[in-house]
C-alpha cells in the first residue's frame, strides 16, 4: 500500500499537467497563501474563510485523480487484491496531495499575516487542529469520490467535466441555502471556539470517512466491471 502511494506521488507532476500545470499550481498557492493575506490582512481570520481554505482539496484533487485513474485505467492489474492496492494507492496519493496543498496554503497564510499584522494571528490551537482534521477528511473524500467517478467515466476529460459540474451544483446549493432566512439554519452555525469546533471537526471526519470507504469500494467495483466503455 505505502509503495503504491509513493509511486503515485512520483507521477503527480504529470497528472497535474506537466510543467505548465505545476507552474499554475504554484501560482495559485502564492496568490492564496501570500498575496491575499498581505492584501486583505485580518479580514481573512474568519471561520468561514478559513474553512474555505481547508476545503481547497475539493478544487485541487479531482483533476489530478481524473488523470491518475481514468488516464491509466488500461493499466489496472488483473487480480482483485492487486486492483484494490492500485485503487487505494491512487486514492492515498490524491488525498495526500490535496491535504498537503491545504496545509501549505494555511502555513503561508499564517506567515503572511505575521508580516501584514506585525504579530502572529490569534488562532486557538484546538481550532487549528480541527481545521486540519476537516481538511484531511475532505481530501480523502474528494480523492475517493473522484476515483469512483473517474473509473466509470469514458475518459479523463469526461471525468473532469462531470466533477466540475458536480462542484458547481454543490456551490449553487450552498449559496441558495445560505441566503435563506430559515430558522433551522441557525442550529447549524459554525462554532468559533476551539473545543466546540474540534468536536464538529471530529463528527465531520467520521461522516466523510465513512463515505470515503464506500466510495473506494465503489471505485473498486467499477474497476472489476467487465463492461467496455467506448471513448466516443
Image (cartoon, rainbow, N blue to C red):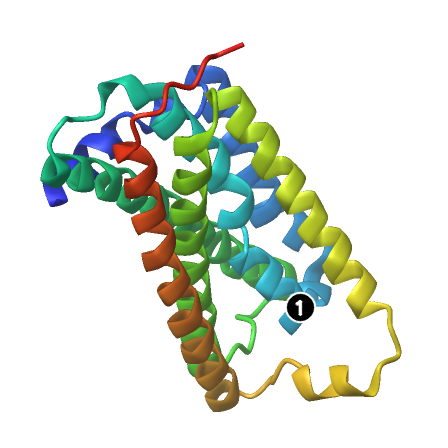
Where the C terminus falls, by quadrant? top right
Residue sitting farthest toward the top? 232
Q: Residue furthest front?
A: 227
Q: Quadrant of residue 177?
A: bottom right
- Determine whether the residue tagged by mark 1 lies in a helix, strand or loop: helix
The reply, left or right, for residue 144 in relation to residue 114 is left
Against 165, is 192 above or below? Answer: below
Q: Residue at x 56, y 88 (%)?
A: 193
Can you say which quadrant of the picture contains the N terminus? top left
**What residue is rendered at 45% in x and 25% in y?**
22
Q: Which residue is mark 1?
A: 48
Q: 217 or 118: which is nearer to us?
A: 217
Q: Which corner quadrant of the image does residue 2 belong to?
A: top left
Nearest the eye: 128 or 139: 139
Drawn side of residue 215 relative to residue 116, left or right: left
Determine the residue positioned at 71% across, 52% down: 171
- Vertical placement of residue 126 versus 30, above or below: below
From this view, report whether residue 134 is shown above or below residue 141.
below
Left or right: residue 156 compared with residue 30 = left
Q: Position of residue 144 (x, y in %)?
A: 38, 48
- Seen in the image, is 39 located left or right of residue 100? right
Q: How many marks?
A: 1
Picture coordinates of residue 162 (x, y %)?
Answer: 59, 34
Relative to 209, say whether 221 is above or below: above
Q: Position of residue 224 (x, y in %)?
A: 25, 34
Q: Residue 168 lies in what quarter of the image?
A: top right
Disc 1 packing (10 Å; few <14; some 14–19; many ≥20): few
Image location of residue 183, percent across then percent down? 82, 87
114 or 137, which lies in front?
137
Amino acid at each position: 500500500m505505502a509503495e503504491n502511494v509513493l509511486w503515485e506521488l512520483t507521477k503527480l507532476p504529470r497528472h497535474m499537467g506537466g510543467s505548465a500545470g505545476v507552474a499554475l499550481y504554484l501560482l495559485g498557492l502564492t496568490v492564496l497563501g501570500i498575496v491575499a493575506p498581505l492584501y486583505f490582512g485580518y479580514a481573512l481570520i474568519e471561520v468561514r474563510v478559513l474553512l474555505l481554505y481547508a476545503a481547497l482539496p475539493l478544487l485541487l484533487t479531482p483533476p489530478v485523480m481524473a488523470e491518475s485513474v481514468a488516464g491509466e485505467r488500461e493499466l489496472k492489474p488483473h487480480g482483485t487484491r492487486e486492483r484494490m492496492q492500485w485503487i487505494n494507492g491512487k486514492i492515498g496519493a490524491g488525498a495526500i496531495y490535496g491535504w498537503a496543498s491545504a496545509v501549505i496554503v494555511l502555513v503561508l497564510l499564517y506567515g503572511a499575516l505575521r508580516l501584514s499584522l506585525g504579530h502572529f494571528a490569534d488562532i486557538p490551537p484546538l481550532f487549528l487542529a480541527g481545521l486540519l482534521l476537516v481538511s484531511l477528511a475532505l481530501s480523502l473524500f474528494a480523492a475517493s469520490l473522484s476515483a469512483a467517478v473517474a473509473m466509470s467515466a469514458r475518459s479523463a476529460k469526461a471525468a473532469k467535466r462531470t466533477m466540475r459540474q458536480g462542484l458547481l451544483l454543490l456551490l449553487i446549493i450552498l449559496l441558495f441555502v445560505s441566503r435563506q432566512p430559515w430558522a433551522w439554519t441557525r442550529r447549524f452555525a459554525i462554532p468559533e471556539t476551539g473545543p466546540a469546533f474540534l468536536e464538529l471537526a471530529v463528527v465531520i471526519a467520521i461522516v466523510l470517512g465513512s463515505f470515503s470507504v464506500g466510495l473506494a469500494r465503489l471505485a473498486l467495483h467499477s474497476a472489476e466491471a467487465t463492461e467496455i466503455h467506448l471513448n466516443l
